[in-house]
Amino acid sequence: MSVSPTSGTPQSLPARIARQMELDVRLLGMVVALLVIWVAFDLLTGGRFITPRNLFNLTVQTASVAVMATGMVFVIVARHIDLSVGSVLGFVAMLMGAFQSQWLPGVLGPDNPAIWLLTIGFGLIVGSAIGALQGYIIGYLAIPAFIVTLGGLLVWRGAAWWVTTGQTIAPLDSTFLIFGGGIQGTLGFLWSWIFGAICMVAIVYLTIANRQKRKAFQFPLKPVWAEYTNAITLSAGVILFVGVMNAYPIPERAANRLAEARGIPVPEDGLGWVHGIAIPVVIVAIVALVMTFVARRTKFGRYVFAIGGNPQAADLSGIDTKKMTVYIFTLMGALCALSAVIASARLQSAANDLGTLDELRVIAAAVIGGTSLAGGVGTIYGAILGALVMQSLQSGMALVGVQTSLQSIIIGIVLVAAVWIDQLYRRRIGA
Amino acid sequence: MTDQTPLVEMRDIHVSFGGIKAVDGVSCTLNPGEVVGLLGHNGAGKSTLIKVLSGAYRADEGAILINGEEAAISSPRDARRYNIETIYQTLALADNLDAASNLFLGRELTTATGSLDDVRMEAETRKIMGRLNPNFRKFEAPVSALSGGQRQSVAIARAVYFEAKILIMDEPTAALGVQETAMVSELIKQLKSEGISIFLISHDIHDVFDLSDRLTVMKNGRLVDTVRVEDVSQDDVLAMIIAGQRPNGGQITNGG
């Protein structure tokens, strides 16, 4: 509350720039923290951390938690919590496993090309239904989300066991496995660059479109240098990322087997195939884009933030907060199902303990990413960065050889410290 | 004036909460273009009474008449249909959103594709704030960064933008400093000159005495009396608020 009222005098240019940089400072702080972690682990492991191979694995390992973290941002912003996401993931993964390996092949015949699509559709429906049910109990029966989803954590984990009475389901449909980001689940060299190019075109387009619109209404504009800096930095980030992912070669024998399966002749001097961007990362990118759009450009997103800022005000403004609660948890459930696809495809099997403790990782990712448990504040990109920070710590410590028990201690301390630093920062800028 | 059909008539309103009669058979009226001050101690029932009109509470008994016709108001949405806008004591603003988002909350402008048209909403907000509070500049900051008076002007702009004919202001200057109170008072005069009818709720007589045409005083959930401001002194009104005494010789325009 330290913001001084500047009534009377128009805001000066430096003040405006400082305000525009405010968002970037938060983001920048997280990126710097991430880089520090990476460099530190790289030094500790003698250069084994910042390698294309490790960074590729890091992105794939982060994907499942990152997808759910985007939904958790909405849940927490609206002053709720969802402790059931890990269990929902496990239950949906088991159902999808049984659906694609035991039920559908019997109906459609084995290796039917529609199996993967039907399975994912089925999973999304089940995940949404579970979310809607929990949202209904929270919104209409007025039982706190903490309790409902704590119950859900137990219920859905138990239900996951009952699907096959505890047996792991494998193998999964071969097309379904693409979503796990294994050797067959990447974009490859050319498509990775095409993907990168699409991202860059989008960055430039959005920058220009936004500027044009504000210009049309003669609003104050960001300085051009700030727009350039933003667009160039983001584009450079995309190029660097694609370059690194494309620098991770597929082992020759695996590549040859893959070429054989696809009917491509192997040249004398080898295929020289690379991984490129993993499919789960593409999913995260799409989810991030859609969720950011929903948060900023739709009534639904606006209402989520309004409820978090002042539930009473939202109610008095005619927003149906009960219905909104159902929608928010339905979305969370659907994202859990999407994560279940990624997680089970990555392990190439569905086990009933899949996603155990994910609720804590997801909540931690959202909170480290700047989502306030008091509600009303949070960003999608922050949550994804938060997920990446968490996974970097975990992978890094595993690589260094830190004991598992010590790993949890460190991650727990980092979580608390991150929120503390964030609060200090918020108090300083008076937000 | 007495022959005219009142714009709003609340007739014999009863509201109780678990056996406690918060409002006990109160009637009051608001004429077109008039400012009526609704006075009483904290807990006198004035906020409860007015929340019946704004749709936040439902009356157990009694009727609301708008332009002489009975109106069914059971939610804030219903009230808006009758062009009744309320500015709540607790300031119904979402602190984390900017002025434009708050102004249009629940009634957002959208583009052809159905997405939020933030730029147009900001343009509209700039337009109306330019009229109501020309010094207002913080269009991009969340309203938590605004002063009390600025927040109040956003809440008022919201009511005015959506063409309120009946404006309910619950303690509009309670949290404000001297200068800001003056600003809001000016705003109320301006709204009145534009033909908006206003219910002004306050526990402090000084806030409303100079702004109101008539004063309705409540005590312990009951109506004390309604008087014209020109017929009474501030001391008379204080006696009404504190002791529940009707003023001697004060002309009773709408006895209870």
Image (cartoon, rainbow, N blue to C red):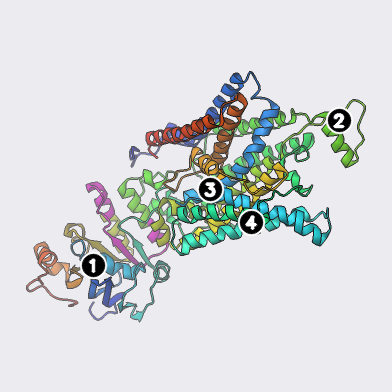
Instruction: Give SS at disc 1.
Output: loop
Reading the image, the residue beneath label 1 is B45
* Contact, mark 1 vs mark 2 (Cβ under 8 Å): no
Residues under labels 4 and 3: Cα distance?
27 Å
Q: Chain of mark 4?
A: A
Q: Quadrant of the N terminus of chain B?
A: bottom left
Tell me if A365 is positioned left or right of A260 in this view. left
Most distant residue in the left direction: B248
Q: Nearer the viewer, residue B150 or B19?
A: B19
The three-letter code of the residue at mark 3 reads Met
Depth check, mark 1 against mark 3: the one in front is 3
Task: Let me know if residue B98 is in the magenta part.
Answer: no
Contact (CB < 8 A) between labels 1 and 4?
A: no
As drawn, the label of residue A162 is 4
What is the three-letter code of the residue carrying label 1? Gly
Residue beneath label 2, please?
A271
Protein chain holding label 2: A
Q: Nearer the viewer, mark 4 or mark 3?
A: 4
